[in-house]
Image (cartoon, rainbow, N blue to C red):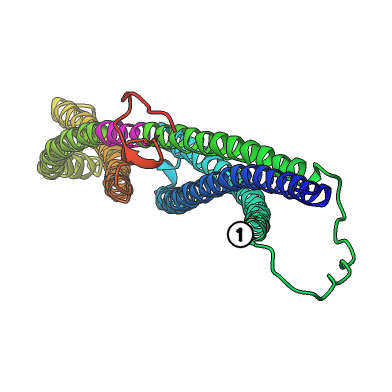
């Protein structure tokens, strides 16, 4: 073997070692890129799931908010005397605040998810581009390894201009930077999902708790108003009974007065008639004394009966006014009871159990179940 052959073989060995080393490094980076790209696609799939979940919860919160406003409007149509700041009104107002906060929180988390997905998609594009470059470079290096020397008298052509633009290890550094950024994006995406589930579950539990409080307040209000309405009906029955008795007493008094008027008029007429006697006969005799006594006694009886009748009439007037007030109050209570029944029936279905994540999937668990890792 001459010196030229030895130099050629050494150069061939050096090139082959360099190519094999580069292929090994490129293959390793390609594997990391493929693994990271798969994880990125998986993260994007999970983010799509949480985005869908958040959108559904946001829609549900909005539906509950609209129904809450309808129920408040329904109770706002109660009669004037029933428009008080009662417990159901307070709890419905608290429910409005809880639902408005739930919508706000859902919007915030939807924006966080959108930002995280945007970052993941940008990194996905970088990973795919880098992976394509690595695959192409690896194919070329393997092609170089598979090349064999060819015979020919023609002199080798001159080399093309170099296409090298980066530093010797820049190709690895950029890839590792992309991989590190992807891992960080995965970590942020995982935290975003956990936060989103925590927020939606927390707001869902608050919504459900407030739902129960509102329904209980309406039930208690219905119970109270019904009891008051029954008391008013008892009072109305007593008033009707007293009115009936007074009407009979009024009739009896009017009859008694009517019966006393003829004797009273007769006594007066006799007394007036005897005042026309001749002067010498006009003395205060026993007849005149008897007539005057009879007239005064009858008049006192009639006056007393008239006073009693006036008292009965006055009492009847008050009772009739009281009856009218009771009837109006009962009518308002009945209307209020009907409206609160409608308001209670307008409530949507009771919110379900909280949602938690298990591995990469979404599962439904009852509150208090052990939450699994994401």
- In the figure, is residue 66 to the left or right of 142? left
Which of the pair 343/295 is nearer the observer? 343
Which of the pair 67/202 is nearer the observer? 202
Q: Residue 180 at x, y = what percent?
A: 68, 37
Which residue sits at x=48%, y=48%?
Answer: 42
**Main SS of residues in magenta:** helix
Q: Which residue is mark 1?
A: 146
Residue neighbourhood size for the residue with mark 1, other residues' Cα within 10 Å, grouped as few (<14), some (14–19), many (≥20) = few
Q: Residue 314 at x, y = what percent?
A: 30, 37
| Image quadrant where residue 327 sits | top left
- Whether 21 is drawn above or below 370: the answer is below
Which residue sits at x=28%, y=44%?
Answer: 337
Which of the pair 338/92 is nearer the observer? 92
- In the figure, is residue 343 to the left or right of 312? right
- In the figure, is residue 103 to the left or right of 324? right
Which residue sits at x=62%, y=37%?
Answer: 183
* Boundaries of the magenta span: 212-225
Q: Is residue 286 visible?
A: yes
Q: Residue 132 at x, y = what percent?
A: 64, 59
């Amino acid at each position: 073997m001459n010196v030229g052959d030895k130099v050629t073989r050494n150069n061939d060995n050096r090139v082959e070692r360099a190519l094999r080393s580069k292929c090994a490094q490129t293959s390793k980076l390609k594997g990391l890129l493929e693994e990271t790209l798969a994880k990125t696609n998986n993260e994007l799939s999970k983010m799509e799931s949480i985005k869908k979940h958040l959108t559904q919860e946001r829609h549900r919160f909005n539906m509950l908010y609209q129904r809450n406003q309808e129920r408040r409007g329904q109770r706002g149509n109660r009669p004037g005397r029933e428009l008080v700041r009662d417990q159901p009104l307070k709890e419905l107002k608290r429910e409005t605040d809880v639902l408005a906060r739930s919508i706000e929180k859902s919007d915030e988390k939807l924006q966080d998810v959108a930002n995280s997905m945007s970052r993941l998609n940008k990194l996905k594009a970088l990973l795919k581009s880098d992976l394509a470059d690595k695959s192409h470079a690896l194919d070329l290096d393997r092609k170089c390894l598979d090349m064999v020397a060819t015979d020919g008298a023609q002199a080798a052509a001159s080399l093309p201009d170099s296409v090298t633009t980066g530093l010797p290890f820049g190709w690895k550094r950029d890839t590792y930077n992309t991989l590190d950024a992807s891992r960080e994006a995965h970590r942020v995406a995982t935290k975003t999902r956990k936060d989103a589930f925590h927020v939606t579950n927390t707001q869902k539990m608050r919504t459900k708790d407030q739902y129960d409080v509102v329904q209980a307040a309406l039930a208690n209000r219905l119970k109270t108003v019904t009891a008051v309405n029954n008391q008013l009906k008892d009072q109305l029955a007593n008033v009707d009974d007293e009115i009936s008795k007074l009407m009979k007493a009024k009739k009896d008094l009017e009859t008694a007065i009517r019966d006393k008027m003829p004797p009273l008029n007769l006594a007066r007429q006799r007394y007036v008639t005897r005042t026309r006697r001749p002067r010498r006969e006009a003395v205060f005799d026993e007849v005149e004394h008897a007539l005057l006594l009879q007239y005064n006694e009858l008049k006192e009886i009639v006056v007393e009966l008239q006073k009693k009748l006036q008292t009965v009439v006055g009492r009847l007037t008050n009772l009739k006014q009281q009856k009218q007030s009771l009837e109006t109050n009962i009518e308002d209570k009945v209307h209020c009871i009907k409206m609160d029944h409608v308001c209670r029936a307008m409530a949507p279905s009771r919110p379900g159990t909280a949602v938690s994540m298990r591995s990469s999937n979404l599962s439904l668990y009852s509150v208090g179940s052990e939450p699994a890792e994401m």
